[in-house]
Image: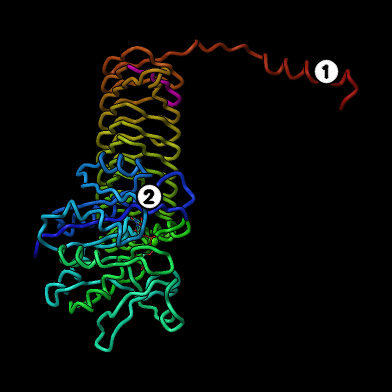
């Protein structure tokens, strides 16, 4: 394969989003659209990745600079069209020899396999390869006009199309593949003589063909190249991603009773033989090991669920929750930045934050780690086999020794030694007959006021 550079266009205004956030930073599957495209470029094996940004969106640049593997950035001073935008990367590629793929920052669901298919066609025919799709409703897209041999004669934008061209449902995805030098040469010939008075990238096809180069297309499903221009289309892209993630999970051995109510993030990792009940949300950074059972209505983010663990119904795992093998976390339990070692459990109505819970420890109903004093977070350590009585408040920093028991309702402020019983509650007082006497006095008062 020749060396390959990917140019991602992200300098459009994105006005149809009606947002203060630049369009390409809106998320699909909890990942910014621009990051999806860059990830696809990476898996495709791009040697260079250049994002074309506008001067009006410093947030996009800041976002890209923070990335683990920051791409190169080129600035398009004015949004004069997609062809003009690609030219903004010309200088960066001035001594680059190889192929260029053009992707749009608002088309997040493109798969590296599809780019591979385009490269295969270019390897045989050379010239320019376009990624096309058959649209159910082609309105708004550029149309690929085929010749008798099934090659692409030219691309016509919706606004510039006549009735016959508008009837064509073979559309332009916006993804192009061509030799770098050829691409830049064709782009320098593009004129803004169209309805929008813009420099269209799409014109390189007609120009390339006139110059005698092959102009082929590769087809892909419409859902893969859905271009996001509005919030409505953002939700449609999200739906495509969710369906893809659900399908992949089920094919990999995950059982879902109602997959349409389970939501994934781009990096959710679930092993085989996990059962997921309805209405479960996976935020970013979650992995679930084989045999775990996630009951209905759970919310997880930044969490690890170990093999055979049981979660929910109605449990919440926040970042840093780390459940080891066969841990049990029940209803209305919230875990944040805390490790539960093997077979530890908290079955009901509990908050565990900034803590380490030893193997087989049992946290009774209503256990609370009081981890925050309004300024700092403090740590709680619960030893192996400890038994925390119901409604225990553990005021951190505090350590409960292995095998210790805390009495129900206790407020624990000092460390507890292993195997001890600790109780902190005011002594119970009993007054014989008081309740009966109280009731009789109240009834007599009521009768005195003439009420039954
Ligand atoms: C474009 C294509 C159309 C195709 C459709 C697929 C052109 C002329 N039209 O139309 O054939 O069917 O995408 O979704 O190419 N951008 C810049 N600078 C600019 C203009 C745009 O960087 O000056 C970027 C945008 O940020 C966006 C991408 O290019 O990521 C596409 O621009 P957009 O205005 O959305 O093009 P469409 O009208 O959707
Ligand atoms: Ca678009």
Say if the magenta span includes residue 394: yes
- In which quarter of the view is residue 168 placed? bottom left
Q: Which residue is mark 2?
A: 27
Q: How is the image coloured?
A: rainbow
Q: Which residue is mark 1?
A: 444
Ligand 2 located in image quadrant: bottom left
Left or right position of 2 against 280: left
Measuring from the top left, give residue 421's x and y in whole percent: 34, 16
- Image quarter hosting the N terminus: bottom left
| Magenta part of the chain | 390-397
- Image quarter hosting the C terminus: top right
Identified at 32% across, 22% down, the residue is 380
State whether residue 80 is above or below residue 191: above
Measuring from the top left, give residue 306's x and y in whole percent: 26, 43
Identified at 56% across, 11% down, the residue is 429
Q: Under tag 1, what secondary structure?
A: helix
State whether residue 171 is above or below residue 319: below
**Residue 334: which numbered mark, if any?**
none
* Residue 147 is at least partly visible in this image: yes
Q: Residues within 10 Å of mark 2 (few under 14, many from 20)?
A: some
């Amino acid at each position: 394969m020749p060396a390959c550079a990917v140019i991602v266009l992200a300098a459009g205004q994105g006005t149809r989003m009606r947002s203060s956030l630049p369009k390409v930073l809106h998320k699909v599957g909890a990942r910014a659209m621009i990051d999806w495209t860059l990830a696809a470029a990476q898996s495709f094996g791009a040697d260079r990745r250049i994002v074309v940004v506008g001067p009006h969106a410093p947030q996009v640049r800041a976002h890209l600079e923070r990335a683990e593997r920051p791409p190169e950035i080129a600035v398009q001073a004015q949004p004069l069209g997609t062809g003009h935008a690609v030219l903004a990367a010309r200088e960066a590629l001035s001594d680059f020899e190889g192929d260029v793929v053009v992707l749009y920052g608002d088309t997040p669901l493109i798969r590296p396999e599809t780019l591979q298919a385009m490269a295969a066609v270019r390897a045989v025919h050379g010239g320019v390869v376009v990624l096309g799709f058959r649209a159910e409703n082609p309105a708004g897209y550029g149309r690929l006009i085929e010749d008798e041999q099934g090659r692409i004669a030219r691309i016509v934008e919706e606004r510039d199309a006549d009735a016959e061209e508008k009837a064509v449902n073979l559309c332009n995805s916006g993804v192009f593949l061509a030799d770098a030098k050829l691409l830049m040469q064709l782009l320098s010939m593009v004129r803004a003589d169209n309805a929008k008075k813009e420099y269209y990238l799409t014109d390189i096809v007609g120009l390339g063909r006139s110059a005698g180069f092959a102009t082929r297309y590769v087809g892909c499903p419409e859902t893969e190249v859905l271009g996001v221009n509005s919030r409505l289309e953002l939700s449609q892209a999200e739906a495509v991603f969710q369906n893809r993630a659900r399908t992949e999970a089920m094919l990999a051995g995950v059982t879902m009773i109602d997959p349409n109510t389970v939501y994934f993030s781009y990096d959710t990792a679930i092993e085989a033989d996990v059962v997921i009940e309805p209405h479960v949300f996976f935020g970013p950074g979650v992995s679930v090991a084989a045999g775990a059972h996630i009951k209905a209505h759970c919310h997880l983010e930044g969490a690890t669920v170990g093999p055979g663990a049981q979660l929910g119904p109605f449990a919440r795992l926040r970042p840093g929750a780390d459940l080891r093998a066969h841990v049990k976390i029940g209803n209305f339990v919230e875990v944040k930045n805390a490790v539960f070692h093997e077979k530890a459990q908290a079955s009901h109505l509990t908050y565990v934050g900034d803590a380490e819970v030893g193997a087989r420890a049992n946290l009774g109903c209503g256990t609370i780690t009081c981890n925050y004093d309004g300024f700092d977070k403090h740590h709680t350590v619960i030893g192996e086999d400890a038994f925390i009585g119901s409604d225990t408040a553990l005021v951190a920093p505090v350590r409960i020794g292995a095998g210790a028991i805390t009495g129900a309702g206790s407020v624990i402020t000092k460390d507890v030694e292993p195997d001890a019983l600790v109780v902190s509650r005011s002594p119970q007082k009993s007054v014989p007959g008081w309740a009966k006497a109280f009731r009789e006095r109240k009834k007599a008062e009521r009768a005195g006021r003439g009420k039954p």
